[in-house]
Amino acid sequence: MKRFSTTVILEPFRERLFAILWVGAFISNIGTWMQNVGVGWLAATLSASPLVIALIQVASSVPALLFSYPAGVISDHADRRKLLIWIQVYLFIVVLILSVLTQLRLLDINFLILFTFLIGIGSAFTTPIWQAITPEVVSKNRMKQAVTLNGVNFNLARAIGPALGGIILVYGGIESIFLFNAVSFLALVIGLYKWNNTFSVFRPIHFRKTAVEGIRAVRKSKPFLQVLIRTISFTAFVSIVFAFLPQMSKYVWKQNSGQYTWLWVSLGIGALAGSYLYGILNRFFSSSKVIFLSCELVAICLFLLARSTNFYLLNGIMFLAGIGWINATSTLNVLAQQLSLDEFKGRFLAVNVTIFQGSIALSSIGWGYLSEIYTTIPVMKAAAIIMAIFSAVLLLLPTEEAEKTEENAIACGDPLLQFHLK
């Protein structure tokens, strides 16, 4: 069986521009994950309402629901380098204002939700553009390794960011996290200034006509619709972890900010470990079975989270949830990539991102509303049971299978808008 050696995987770092952008993106990703942890704890500090705290997750996901499709179109018809620079500058200003408001003690839960939404807008536009530039900053013969390294970048930041964020949260306060994240956007800008890209003006397209054609094509593709159903069945339930974790940590488990941080670290380490199991699992199990097993694992974790209070046990559960999260989302993303029609590739994948983020946003509102009526513990138990049953039923639904991945493939939990590996 053919494997990449470590030396081969690191080949893209021989190209200076890729290495600079990779480091810049890594710093920015760490800042993002630090802020995710800090914002969740701050929301729980500002409000005890599960619904209000869940709105933080909603505010983070809604921008992708609204802007992923137009962002993908824009990225194909504009200078991606300039767009990325301006978006990073926008994010720097927004997060810097957030830090100043926090230091002046002017930040309340409403402002926090608003600024989370504004940051989400920047992220929604960054994702498709960032994914689209990979073939422009690395040689074609090193593309496969570059995609792998981008996955390593995201997963490492997912593990390191919460840990570093927790330390800064304890010793420097939330305003220090915001400041670090603001500066991290400038790290990426510095790398982008080193990139002398060539931009060709594309022929303008009729946006509405193009969008409608893409939606019609998606509706006619039964295999792709089956993937979307599975995406909803997973994200609608796993969203309860991100929506409820701050509230449960502070008010149910009576934890401090350091213990709350460790829950995120455990989730990140689990995702990092699971990302290296991804290629192996997909070689021995069909895509539908990997999704089923991942959903069942997450469902079990949801139920155990509702039943447990021991700090160490909770971290173990979050570790397992990270494994389930990364393998389900990665398998769903690969299916979406491979079942997208070439003629409509970008629009199919934009629909996938919209459904992915939209399901998280809308379900977070639903879980938050139900928790106001029945409290968080019963709602989480119910979500776990329904998820386990629903995923088992979907196993009976026939679906197209993804092509077998290489055993050393690295998983990445974010839904993709572009796929450049040929």
Image (tube, grey):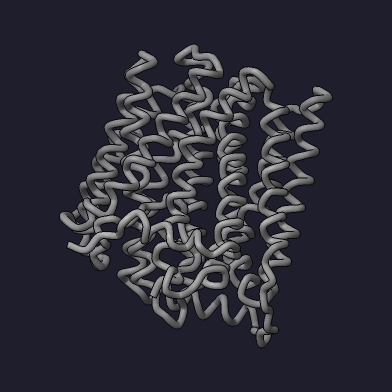
Left or right, 83 with respect to 146, comes to right
User: Where in the figure is residue 233, as x and y percent of width and height?
Assistant: 35, 49
Q: Along the line of sight, which residue is nearer the eye, 14 or 197?
A: 14
Q: Is residue 318 visible?
A: yes
Q: Is residue 52 visible?
A: no
Q: What residue sits 58% from the left and 55% below the top?
A: 64
Quadrant into which the C terminus falls = bottom left
Left or right, 318 with respect to 58, comes to left
> Which residue sits furthest right?
104
Quadrant into which the N terminus falls = bottom left
Q: What residue sits 48% from the left and 48% below the top?
A: 154
Left or right, 357 with respect to 394, comes to right
User: Where in the figure is residue 338, as x and y percent of width and height?
Assistant: 34, 70
Among the 4 quarters of the image, the one containing residue 66: bottom right
User: Where in the figure is residue 412, as x and y percent of width and height?
Assistant: 41, 52
Left or right, 90 with respect to 413, comes to right
Residue 154 in the image: above or below residue 287: above
Q: What residue sits 66% from the left and 53% below the top?
A: 188
Among the 4 quarters of the image, the one containing residue 322: top left
